[in-house]
Amino acid sequence: MRYLPLSDNDRADMLARIGVDSIDELFADIPEAVRLEELTTLPRRKTEMQVERQLSAMANKNVSAGSLPFFVGAGAYKHHVPATVDHLIQRSEFLTSYTPYQPEITQGTLQALFEFQTQVANLTGMEVANASMYDGSTGTAEAVLMAHRVTRKKKAVLSGGLHPQYREVVEGVSAKLPGASVAALPADPTGTEDILAQIDDETSCVVVQSPSFYGQLIDLKPIAEKAHKHKALLIAVFTEVVSLGLLESPGAQGADIVVGEGQSIGNPLTFGGPYVGLFATRQKYIRNMPGRVCGETTDAEGKRGFVLTLSTREQHIRRDKATSNICTNSGLCSLAFTIHMTLLGGKGLARLARINHMSAVALADALSAVDGVEVLNSAYFNEFTIRTPKNAHDVIEALAAKGVLGGVPVCRLDKSGGDIDNLIVVASTEVNTDEDRAAYAQALKEVLA
Amino acid sequence: MTMNHQGRPTRAGEAGPPMPHQTFTGNKALDMEEPLIFEIGHMDNCGVDLDEPMDFVPRLGNHMRSEPVELPALSEPETMRHYVRMSRNNYAIDSGLYPLGSCTMKHNPRLNEKMARLPGFADIHPLQPISTVPGAFELISELADWLMELTGTNAVAMSPKAGAHGEQCGMMSIKHAIAAKGEERSIVLVPESAHGTNPATAALVGYKVVSIPAREDGTVAVEAVIEKIEAHAGQVAALMLTNPNTCGLFEPEVIEIANAIHEAGGYFYCDGANFNAIVGKAKPGDLGIDAMHINLHKTFSTPHGGGGPGSGPVVLSDRLAPYAPLPFIRKNGDELEVVETTDQLKDGEQPFGRMTAFFGQMGMYVRALSYMQSHGSDGLKQASEDAVLNANYVRVGLQDLMTLPFGVKPCMHEVLFDDSFLNDTGVSTLDFAKAMIDEGYHPMTMYFPLVVSGAMLIEPTESESRASLDLFVATMRDLVMSAKAGEKDRFEGAPFLAPRRRLDETAAARKPILKWVAPEPTKVEPELA
């Protein structure tokens, strides 16, 4: 087997050295009744070429985003990632290193994390950020738990603009906690819900996504004010981090925790994971923050260096009193994020954001010119919601048959019915061309005709 | 003709005295200091070429940024150099033996990286029409089949994003199953030797943790479990047990323990972190587990990446299968049906909710399946045997000099020593570990598990050759003899040769500096101006 260095001679010599007659003597503690002879039901080893052939055959059955006009968003976005990023994250020293528990020999990972944290904090307009979460959805659930710890209250109010699957993740975690409750507002495609009326003294946190799941931009300031009046925290969520290049930062609008999906920068779509959750908050809350954190310090010779810190919050020290059970972050995905962000800088990000916005504006114009199609959002970034006269699921399938992946039918995620069944969330980014947009408009016209 | 037209001889010559001065740059030849991007980056430059979009009327309402994003950029060559230089300050599996017990730092085949980057896997969206991604569900389904077959179970929840997330998924399934029976139970039993994630997860899911002491031989006695079950009659929801355990031992009474917890109406959660020891040798389902997460980043070699991403699918017993979270794949003969929302559920399916948006760590699924197909059933079994063989080879090479807390006996894929061999040497466990760094090794896991004083947990994995193990054992022996000979200078303050000396972690925690802040401009004293 090409991955195993020991030869049969090595094995025999080593067994003799250990003083046993057979390898099975080393497994003697396994009860005899359950010891396996062989896994006859599974195939035997394959060469590299055979594996490549088999997996490529599976991959080839999928329609990849780059192969056709592609407008699917709703929490994951198709962007161009510079070749440099994927090359650098495959450096052995980054790829095959563990969590940096021995800082003297992992300064590479640690410095990258420190730079990552600084980028995320500056981008979100917050004082501090952690070293990443699994993804935006699990990060949002952790943010709610953190708010419960900070406020010592347990009622979360969720905006109807929050990604439906994010809402489900928050509800799932909360449902298992004694006393915790979730007040989730109904779907709000246009950003016109009255969330302020939901905030009271019992409220621990208000969770608002902007741009919303439907693409609508939400003014966070009044929500922050009302939340703070009731000693609740505002958790600002985003799924499209590129938007922060152009939009007012959640921190500047009064958010207490900012959490979101960082996939758009540096990371491919990969069918939903692995992604990278971004998590930022105020300095005064850091000891309640979940996840790994990297901090600056000095070594015995006075040189600057970095370490994982605030570990007294964490499970390996605090066990059942820990702020969260998280053990890993999303290390390599955060590295991809920070490298791509380093290439862009603030200026490049702003320009990328403008291109994205322009792309969406052009698409909205093209689609709203189709008979019966209405764009619902008054203000949006690179994603918006359209209403079509036909069932959205059927429209998307018909578009796919014409070689256009035209977005996400809201009814795939939200089964509340009614008007929802005719809504499609549509994204357009820097990868989409004028030809793509024209093809979409033409195909939609034919489908609705 | 020689290549050297300058004609300068390059003979080594006498070594002479050591270099008398610090270098101007602070660099030591290939060992280079690298500033932060905030110190070397440009506010007016960019490492990505993007054309400014044509004039258009924005539709951002009043949501425009008031201040520009304050982040510097580096050009492409500067970016490359920045990260390559930083990378060289990292230890990695590809550069040396990485004996971190409980972490399974094995070889990461690059075929797996290549497969994960096929556009048919890397460039597909989780919400594009299901009809356009049949190969994705085929891959997830095939990986699920392997996991169920290797563990002897009939169900697996694929979506958890890491080991601890898998624990959370398993425990939420258990809580839901208990509630579905109309019961309420408040306690989870966790042995003292457990990973910290186990009690943290139990608490996160709303349980009170009751600890079970370890027996003198490092394993859990069924009597100790029964005692706690009886002390909290009717209240025990589950037992969380790592098997093989964190002392590197297979729990010999695991079947009796499973029976005891089942008889009390509770569930058996098994922490699968150490599955690498027994793949193809025993099926956890046959041991009576109800839920077990599998760290794809350990046993099935998806790269650790400096701390993630992981992936933690959870296999489930028939008793827990109905409660598996959304989404899942339902098999109708050869047809795969994707179940994403509650309206698609059939009788008996009662998912407790959802662990994450989308379908979990697809990129890791591809890598793990590539690893499994490459090994096959025969290779997986061989890998486990080699992992256990290697650990025992290290044990036998060191047991006369270092101390085994539970006496001389075979271990599984990792060997646990305690620090009593360092008594009276004045060298601490930490000093000893840091001295390993100077010898070119990543230290083993230290001070874990907590049941042993000064634990040193060594897991060499199956990826090490005999020559590599021989050198490691020889190095460790030399270090031990040196400590016992009173050569404290080699240990105190080590490492001496790493990119950094010991770092002040106390100061870092006391006054946390978690991001770079521009230094105040230096004030010029008036008399100097």
Image (cartoon, coloured by chain):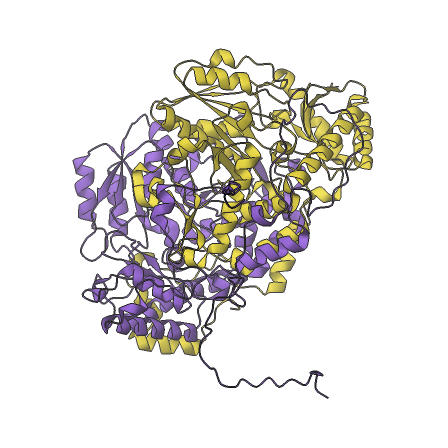
Q: Is residue B331 above or below residue B273?
A: above
Q: Is residue B285 above or below residue B396?
A: above
Locate the N terminus of chain B by quadrant: bottom right
Position of A36 compared to B147: left or right? Answer: left
Residue A377, image quadrant: top right
Find chain A in the image and tell me its colour: yellow
Residue B247, image quadrant: bottom left
* Residue at x-position 58% and y-position 27%: A413
A328 or B350, which is in the foreground? Answer: A328
Residue at the extreme front of the image, as rendered: B527
Find chain B in the image and tell me its colour: purple
For residue B271, say whether it is visible. yes
Give coordinates of residue B358: x percent, y percent.
Answer: 56, 36
Give coordinates of residue B200: x percent, y percent.
Answer: 33, 39
A28 or B479, which is in the foreground? Answer: B479
Residue B225, image quadrant: top left
